[in-house]
Image (tube, helix red, strand yellow):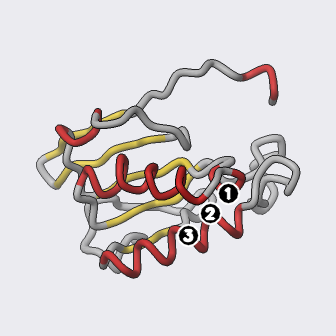
Amino acid sequence: MTDLRTGDCYSFHVEHPAGTLLVHPSANYLPGVLTAHPADTVYLGIGALGKQPPAFREAYWKEVVAATGATRVVAIHWDNFTRSLDRPLQALPPRFDDVHTSLEFLSERCADSGIALVLPRLWGPADPFAPVGDHHR
């Protein structure tokens, strides 16, 4: 896992007749880049976000979620990717991340902003354009 450091941050913006979405798999950001890419749903990478200082988490929220105007956040990249996907999802080990802190932070920000927070189900269907509150079909 430590050999996978690239220092780069990639996002994927998808426009569809049903809506827009942003896949932002890395818990990092470039200031101001995403303001030009509104998204209804943000698939938000939170891996190692819980180990970051509170000021970083606030800036991350502002630069990725608030900047896009999202109404739904789907937390991704929080699970232990060394674990086989034929087993239930498990959080990254505490030495790599504090997933509880990340999810607590997201829960508070989403509640304060009226944004739906979703945790994906392994192999479950998901519709990023479904009405908020009806993410899984």
Residue 46 horizontal/vertical position (percent): 58, 52
The answer to whether mark 1 and mark 2 are in CB contact below 8 A is yes
User: 105 or 23: nearer the eye?
Assistant: 105
User: 128 or 66: nearer the eye?
Assistant: 66
Q: Residues within 10 Å of mark 1 (few under 14, many from 20)?
A: many
The amino acid at mark 2 is Ser
Please, what secondary structure does the residue beneath circle 2 have?
Answer: helix
Q: In which quarter of the image is residue 87?
A: bottom right
First reached walking from the N terminus: tag 1 or tag 2: 1
Residue 130 horizontal/vertical position (percent): 27, 68
The amino acid at mark 1 is Gly
Q: Is residue 66 left or right of residue 82?
A: left
Where is 8 relative to 21, above or below?
above
Where is 4 relative to 40, above or below?
above
Q: In which quarter of the image is residue 1?
A: top right
State the residue at coordinates (42%, 56%): 61
Q: How far apart are marks 3 and 1 (CA)?
A: 9 Å
Residue 81 horizontal/vertical position (percent): 75, 43
The answer to whether mark 2 and mark 3 are in CB contact below 8 A is yes
Q: Mark 2 points at which residue?
A: 102
The answer to whether mark 3 and mark 1 are in CB contact below 8 A is yes
State the residue at coordinates (16%, 55%): 18
First reached walking from the N terminus: tag 3 or tag 1: 1
Please, what secondary structure does the residue beneath circle 3 have?
Answer: helix
The amino acid at mark 3 is Phe
Q: Name the residue under label 3.
A: 105
Q: Distance between the residues labelled 2 and 3?
A: 5 Å
Residue 32 horizontal/vertical position (percent): 28, 37
Q: Name the residue under label 1.
A: 50
Q: Residue 98: which disc? A: none
User: 133 or 66: nearer the eye?
Assistant: 66
Q: Is residue 124 left or right of residue 136?
A: right
